[in-house]
Amino acid sequence: MKRFLLLLAAVATSACVQTTPHWDSQFGNAVRGAIASQTIDPNAAANRDPVMGIDAAAALGAQERYEHSFKQPEPRANVTLINTSGK
């Protein structure tokens, strides 16, 4: 009977514990941390300098090859399997 009353008292007093303020103060921190860790340079939009290192003709050729790769797929090579083991 003592154990039952002790268990009942423990359950009754645990209902009075307030954990919500602690949870509410931490709400959203994980999401904000994940977003901040994925941001490489927060001022990247302010940088208006063009990328240097490739001339216009090479860039145009690369862009045209890229667009052409979606228009017509590359032909598949004919592969013939010849079994010479005799089995």
Image: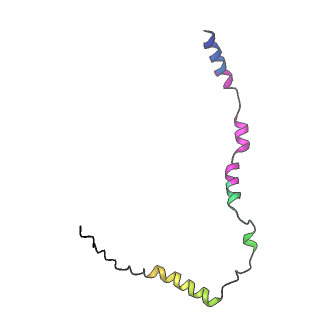
Residue at left 31%, top 77%? 80
Q: What is the quadrant of residue 83 in the picture?
A: bottom left
Residue at left 56%, top 83%? 63
Task: Report the residue that reaches farthest toward the top.
Answer: 1
Task: Report the residue that reaches farthest toward the bottom.
Answer: 57
- Residue 7 spot, x, y in % from top left: 63, 17
Residue 74 vs residue 7, the one in the foreground: 74
- Residue 73 spot, x, y in % from top left: 42, 80
Q: What is the quadrant of residue 6 in the picture?
A: top right
Specify whether 78 is left or right of 74. Answer: left
- Residue 15 spot, x, y in % from top left: 66, 26
Predominant secondary structure, magenta span: helix
Specify whether 68 is left or right of 6. Answer: left
Specify whether 80 is left or right of 27. Answer: left
| Span of residues in magenta | 11-33
Residue at left 39%, top 81%? 75
- Residue 85 spot, x, y in % from top left: 27, 70
Residue 73 vs residue 80, the one in the foreground: 80
Residue at left 75%, top 75%? 47
Q: In the image, is residue 10 part of the stretch drawn in magenta?
A: no
Counting every numbered tag in the picture gives 0
